[in-house]
Structures are given as C-alpha cells and as structure tokens.
C-alpha cells in the first residue's frame, strides 16, 4: 500500500553523511538543539537535525526495521529524535527485561502516543499515568478476574463462542472466504460479554460497523502517516489529511460506548452487576465523595474502550496470521491434527486443561505469536523520575520504546529467529519448554491486562477450529507471502482467502 515514506523526497546531502555521529557547530546554535540536549547523560545515537530530528534515519513506512539498523550501529540502547521528540530505544531480551522488570517502577510510565492522545487526553487505563493509572489498573484486573470466576467463567464464554464460529464456518461449505470478520466477530464477542454483559448477533449491523472501525483504526495506527503524526503532532494536528482519520474512528467508538453506559445507568442494580460497566458505575457511586477518585464517566468510557479494542483486534489478528502460517507449513498443521485427535478426540469440546497434555500444539501457538509480533515496537513507556540505566542518566519524562519484536527475535534465545519453528518451544524430548524472551504481552508493571484471557482464547480457538476443519490455501504453500501488509505501530496481517475442509 505504501511503497515509500510520505517524506521520502528528503535525501541525505553529502555534507550530512560526512557529519553523522558528530554535532556540527552550526546545529548547536539552534535553541531547539540546546533544549533537546540540556539534561541527562543520554545513550548514543545518530545526530538529529533541528525539528526534523532523525527522520533521515527512521523510515516512517518501516520504523521497526530502521530501529534495528540503528541498533546494529549504536548497540542495544540508543537515542533517536522522532522530530523534536526524544526517545530512548531498548533492544533485545536482556536490555528490555533490565528496564521493564528489574527497574519496573522507574519505567512504569506510559509514553506519548500522539495519534491517540487527542481522543484519550491521558484518560483510560491504557494511556493513563500516576495515581489514575494505578487506580484503574487495580480495579480492571480485579473485575476481569472476578468475571473469570463468576457464574459463567471466561473459559465457558470462549467455548460457547467458538461453537457459534464453527456454525458460521460450516456455512462456507468449503468455498473460499476472507476470515477477517469471522474471527473478529467471535473474539470480540468474548470481551463484549464481559464489558457489555452480552454477545452480539453475528449479523448485527452496529456490531459489524464497530468491528470495521476497530480494524480500520489498527490499520491507520500503522500507516506512515500515523508515524509522522507521532513525530510532528505539534504541527500536523492543525493540518487536514489522512492522519486525522484515526481521531474520527476512535470518536465514533467512544460514542457507542457512552451510549451503552447510559443504558446501564438507567437499569443498574447495585446488588447484581451484569458487566464491567456496571461494576465501574457501582465504584463511582462508592467514591463519589472522594475528591481524589479516578472513577468518573470519562475514565469509564475510555477504559471500556481500551478493553474492547485490545480484546478484539490483537487476538483476532493473531488467529488470522496463525491460519496463514499453518497453510504455509502444512506438515505443522498435520502434527497439530494428530495431537488433537490423540488427546481430545472428536467427541468433546477442547478445554484449557488439555494444554498441558498438548506440548506440540502449545509450541505452535507460541511460535505463531512470536512471529506474528502484533506490536513490534511495544507501546511507549516513559521514566517517571530521573533514572540511571546502564551508565546513562535518563531525565524524568524521557519516552522509551522497548522493542518487543527485538526480544521475540533475539538470537540468544531463539536459534533461528526469522524462521517458523515450533521447536523453539520444545525440548529434546518433545516437551513444552518455556522461553524467557517470549514477551508478546510485554512485561513488568504495564504487562497486558488481558494476557490470561488472550492465551486461553488462542488455545481454545485454534484447537476447536482444527479439531473440526483442515485449512486449504488457494495457492501453493511455497507461494504464500507471510510479510505484513503494513508494519508500523502494529504488524497488519496480509489479506487472503482460504477454504475450510470438514474433517
């Protein structure tokens, strides 16, 4: 879709190439340069131009690859300027773990994500900081956990939804189809049952519209225009163009959730909460006299949106990519079929307890997650105080990119990181083997809220689908291209069709 960066017309002059790695005197005269360098002892990195920063080194159509090239030159910790914005980039398992786990508190802030900031303004659990984030995260974790152990467990919700999906798959009668909205509908209904208290009918027009907006938002967040906006929001927020599309998509999603909140408010029974929204409303009432409470309507709407969006897009994209990997490597699919037949058989629904007896299937799912690498650059962090790290001093408020993709492809932990190989998660006896560098959900204090739910969904969906169907590609396996359609904030799976053959 995007062959070149929107600013690909900028080229390095010969003089600039000669000056890389040093600070020319003429650049030091600019006040903006002085401001950028007035604090801290920062890691090395390419010399930025005033305002433009390191746009010459960081391609907006493939930022992750650009960062890996800079890592090869400057090491696993380096500084880049995304426009006037200073960012410290962390690469590799040991570096990221040292920051997010060993110095978890210092690196626990949420960094700037300008393309969403206009919608969220620091509200909602995913983009909040300080006491607001602590209150919302603690509440969200507790509430999700309680729903997981309620009258209908999360596992039962997933199992039920997987059966609805099988019905839809059978209707395709072996004909080619695009799986995007089949998978997003079923996955979204799991989180919908938690946050809204009920599932949507698969043909519900409002539901389909929401899913399209979520899918389009994730795509837009990964375009070069979004990367440019994150660099130059101080200017681009005033300009017309495609970079504004994310704002309007997210606003529409917010409007839907705000309407759901109003419906819940009118029918609320404090003694019988039906969903996440009810639980939040009850907490709002409990804390209405507390001036420091973060339980208000704005945080309710935006936290619900965080859960709904993340609970829909990340798992459905991973499943979509997973089908592609299995079609490209049919011998892997065949081994999964054999393990399913041996452990589960054809006469009962898969359960999470089966996972422990299915090491190969478990390894395949882990390998799919590793190579899918849904959010390769991670969500930005920031240091909440002046922080010493590996001999450097990062001033309070410095944004940090922990490159999760560099961890998932760390050659110290994966023997052949670019290759699809379930053996990365198996020992010599074929038993499942954990790998410390497996961090698709990030790590530390900002680890994904829905990790346990997502892991359960991936296992139950893959086993339920493959128990009932074989995947058939429309092209030879060797011709299947697994390159992402777009790679920016997220890795967007390629668009494709497949056929499902009943087993």
Image (cartoon, helix red, strand yellow):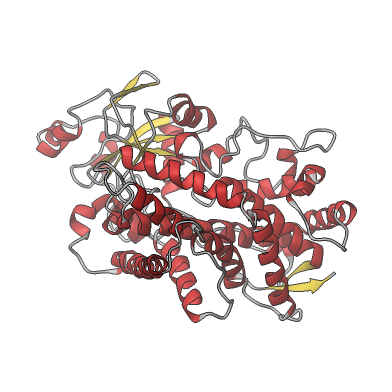
Please tell me which residue lies in front, 370 or 252: 252
Please tell me which residue lies in front, 461 or 124: 124
User: Does residue 420 appear in the picture of this structure?
Assistant: yes
The answer to whether 340 appears left or right of 406 in the picture is right
**Which residue appears at 40% of the width and 28% of the height?**
105
Up/down of 268 relative to 403, above or below: below
Q: Image quarter for residue 43?
A: top left
Residue 179 drawn at (x, y percent): 62, 71
**Which residue appears at 71% of the width and 39% of the height?**
424
The answer to whether 139 appears left or right of 86 in the picture is right
Q: How many marks?
A: 0
Residue 24 drawn at (x, y percent): 18, 32
Please tell me which residue lies in front, 5 or 83: 83
Up/down of 300 relative to 404, above or below: below
Up/down of 167 relative to 258, above or below: below
In which quadrant is the C terminus drawn? bottom right
Please tell me which residue lies in front, 387 or 264: 264
User: Does residue 492 appear in the picture of this structure?
Assistant: no
Q: Going by the picture, which residue comes out furthest to the top?
A: 391
**Which residue appears at 38% of the width and 31% of the height?**
107
The answer to whether 61 appears left or right of 177 in the picture is left
The answer to whether 292 appears left or right of 470 in the picture is left
Q: Going by the picture, which residue comes out furthest to the front?
A: 271
In which quadrant is the N terminus drawn? bottom left
**Which residue appears at 76% of the width and 81% of the height?**
173
Q: Image quarter for residue 151?
A: bottom right
Residue 429 drawn at (x, y percent): 85, 34
């Amino acid at each position: 879709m995007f062959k070149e960066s929107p600013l690909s017309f900028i080229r390095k002059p010969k003089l600039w190439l000669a000056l890389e790695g040093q600070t020319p005197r003429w650049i030091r005269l600019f006040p903006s340069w002085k401001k950028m360098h007035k604090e801290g002892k920062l890691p090395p990195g390419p010399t930025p131009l005033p305002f433009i920063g390191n746009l010459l080194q960081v391609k907006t159509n493939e930022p992750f690859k650009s960062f890996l090239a800079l890592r090869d030159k400057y090491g696993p910790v380096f500084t880049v300027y995304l426009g006037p914005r200073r960012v410290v980039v962390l690469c590799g398992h040991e570096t990221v773990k040292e920051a997010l786990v060993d110095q978890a508190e210092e690196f626990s802030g949420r960094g700037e994500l300008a393309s969403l900031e206009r919608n969220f303004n620091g509200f909602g659990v995913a983009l909040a900081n300080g006491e607001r984030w602590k209150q919302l995260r603690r509440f969200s974790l507790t509430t999700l956990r309680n729903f997981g152990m309620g009258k209908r467990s999360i596992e039962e919700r997933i199992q039920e939804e997987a059966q609805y999906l099988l019905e839809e798959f059978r209707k395709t009668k072996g004909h080619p189809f695009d799986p995007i909205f089949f998978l997003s509908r079923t996955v979204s209904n799991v989180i919908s049952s938690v946050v809204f208290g009920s599932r949507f009918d698969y043909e519900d027009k409002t539901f389909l519209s929401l899913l399209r907006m979520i899918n389009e938002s994730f795509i837009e967040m990964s375009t070069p225009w979004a990367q440019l906006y994150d660099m130059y929001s101080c200017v681009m927020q005033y300009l017309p163009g495609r970079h504004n599309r994310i704002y309007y998509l997210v606003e529409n999603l917010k409007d839907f959730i705000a309407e759901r909140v109003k419906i819940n408010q009118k029918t609320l029974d404090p003694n019988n909460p039906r969903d996440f929204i009810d639980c939040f409303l009850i907490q709002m009432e409990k804390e209405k006299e507390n001036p420091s409470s973060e339980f208000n309507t704005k945080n309710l709407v935006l936290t619900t949106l965080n859960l709904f969006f993340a609970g829909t897009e990340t798992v459905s994209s991973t499943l979509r990519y997973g089908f592609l990997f299995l079609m490209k490597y049919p011998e892997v699919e065949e081994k999964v079929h054999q393990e399913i037949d041996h452990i589960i058989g054809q006469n009962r629904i898969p359960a999470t307890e089966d996972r422990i007896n299915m090491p190969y299937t478990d390894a395949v799912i882990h390998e799919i997650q590793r190579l899918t690498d849904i959010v390769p650059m991670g969500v930005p962090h920031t240091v909440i105080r002046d922080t010493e790290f590996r001999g450097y001093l990062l001033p309070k408020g410095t944004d940090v990119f922990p490159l999760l993709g560099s961890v998932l492809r760390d050659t110290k932990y994966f023997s052949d990181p670019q290759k699809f190989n379930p053996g990365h998660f198996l020992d010599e006896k074929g038993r499942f083997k954990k790998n410390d560098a497996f961090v698709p959900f990030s790590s530390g204090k900002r680890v994904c809220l829905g990790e346990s739910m997502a892991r359960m969904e991936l296992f139950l969906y893959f086993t339920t689908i493959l128990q009932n169907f074989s995947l058939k590609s429309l092209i030879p396996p060797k011709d299947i291209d697994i390159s992402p359609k777009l790679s920016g904030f997220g890795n967007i799976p390629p668009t494709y069709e497949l056929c499902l053959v009943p087993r």
